[in-house]
Image (cartoon, rainbow, N blue to C red):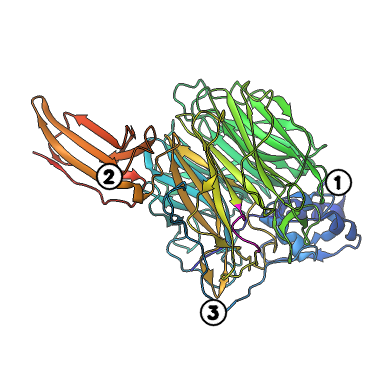
Amino acid sequence: MKKKSTSQSAFFNVRVLIGLFVVLTGVFLALIGFGTFSGLTANSVQAQQTHKIINVAGLPPGFDCAQISALGIDRQENLRAGAIMIACGESEGGSAFSYGAFSRLYQQVTGPLTFGGTDVDLISPQTDAGTHITQSETMSAANPDNPNQIVVAYNDSRSFATSNNISGASVSTDGGTTFVRLTASTGRSPFDNTFGDPVVMYNRESGEWFTVWIDVACGSFGLGGYKTTTPSDPNSWTHFCVHSGSSDDRESGAVDNNPASSHYGNMYVSWNDFAVGGNLKVRFSSDHGVTWTERQLAPASPFIRDVQATVDLTNGDVYVAGMDEGGGGFPHNDTNHMYRSTDGGNTWVHTFIGNPFPGPGLTTCASNSYFACMFTGPSYWRHEGWGQPAANNGIVHLVYAQDGAGADPGDVFYIRSTDKGVTFGAPFKLNTDATTRPQWQPNISAADDNSLLAVWYDARESTSCSKGNPAVPCYRMWARNSTDGGATWGADMEFSDIVTPLPGQPDPNIVTEYVGDYDYSYHVLNAHLHTWVDGRVPISGASQQDPFFDQEGGGGGGGIPCGDLVSFQARCKHTVHGDRLQARVILTDTSHSGEQVTITVDGNPNSVTISGNTATLQIPNEPLGQHTVELTDPAGCFPPSTPTCN
């Protein structure tokens, strides 16, 4: 069946610090170790005047609940922090429930005006049961030298009750058509002693995969992860540390994969360090993760949340987006910030402070009044407006969510900088619906061909949502694209295939309002890779959090519906100068002219532009023998062809 992800803002990492006060020491480290996860509310903080010592299985003993506010546990997003809040009685954990028999009312896309192809479930096979079945909060990456190899990392609570392992990943070797969930011989993911907050990167220079998580093996609650022991093989991993800390939270990461960049191969990890009040920090490595150098981007006050990091695809500049959440609570104002390094992470400039805007949401999260929630009855889906940056050729992009007009709890916006993040233009609203239904938690990818794809959660097609009820459709992923680096945008259209129910959260060790804090999209060549949390697959009669994947071709096209394709042909033509392998895509009309499809020959992808209603790939002097030729964008329309060059 399904498992559910664990990525709120309260990971468990509590270690006893010895130094200042003997009593506060044990409590302090324990709290710090727990991390930064779900909702510590301002009210809950004030309520913690009485010392309550807790002992939670899997956590260091003797944590003093009176230290929640002092340690910033209420502002942290990791799952360990959330577990502390639950154990201290300041937050409510998830609970299992069932709606029994139901008829699925999912709305299916049938028209051609959609992005993407067929949605793919990342949990394969689906064998989860019980309450530890939460998977959400995703980050995607791909191998640019083998685009068929895609890895998606996410929070995964399947082992939450028995081990320090709340992290997971799924791997595709066929360009995203299918995924297999990584499972070690222990039955868990291979990322032991980690508490989620996923980062996944492929370092092109070293040919290695890297994951980064909240990690109890790096200090009491620092940043660490696993890299592949066999280059380019995302099935065998060895442990490493980025930062030995005691209270790290919400890390993000990026890598410079441009061989022409002077910082080619550099990796960057940013995060909030609550051991020093929540400072925004970054570490960079120029030796493939062997050593890491630290820089501080912002002090603890005002608190600037780490949003995400990104590297310019063309020049190697690195950016970290941050957000001032206005002290939390609801309603509240948010402010976007941007930080930039042009010398491989050694020095940084705080380039941009935006204008305050009202944060999204409908209510204060009941379990933690610091955070806002997108739904009521009960309060659900913690979200402060966080989005994602992207950059290409000196143009910087940022998407985020803010409160809508009137009764609208959220809209998604895009801002663009043409001077490397120093100034941004006026915010542009990406969703064009006329409803007061919410749009929230956007992400954006920039591809090599200067195309952009922004994707977000969108409830415009429903009138109400019911937590965990499989019979009540709630939201679909919607998207909008640009083919000119954000100067102009096409129409917003459906991205995922159905209107999914609002998934529940049954894991008692995870804050009940958690549904993942971010989704980080990626690109490979000209294709845009996006993942999200879906509720279409029920377990025990209830919708659960489950990660799904889909992709869209760059250049405004590539994600062509199968109904628009007439045929895909591959053959070997004999010529005077030798054999020539030819593949041709034929469409019904010229509406996709100028867009791109991907034709893969013997595992090597080739981006081909559609001219009129055809796209033709010709490879001269192809070696003799049989070759595998397939149309990989969109996937699933035609089976691979195997022409033989005699």
Between circles 3 and 2, the one closer to the viewer is 3
Left or right: 615 with respect to 33?
left
Badge 1 element: loop
Look at mark 2 in the image and give the residue it sits on.
630
Q: Residue at 39% of width from left, 45% of height from top?
A: 560
Left or right: 238 with respect to 197?
left
What are the residue bounds of the magenta stretch?
458-464
Q: Quadrant of residue 611?
A: top left
Left or right: 535 with respect to 42?
left
* Viewport quadrant of the C terminus: top left
Label 1 or label 2, whichever comes before in sequence order? 1
Measured Cα–Cα span from mark 3 to mark 2: 41 Å
Residue that extends furthest to the bottom in the rendered view of this protein: 101
Task: Decide: few, some or many residues near mark 2? Use Cα within 10 Å; few <14, some 14-19, many ≥20.
Answer: many
Look at mark 3 in the image and give the residue it sits on.
101
Badge 2 element: strand
Q: Residue at 47% of width from left, 52% of height from top?
A: 549
Task: Identify whether 482 is placed above or below 165.
Answer: above
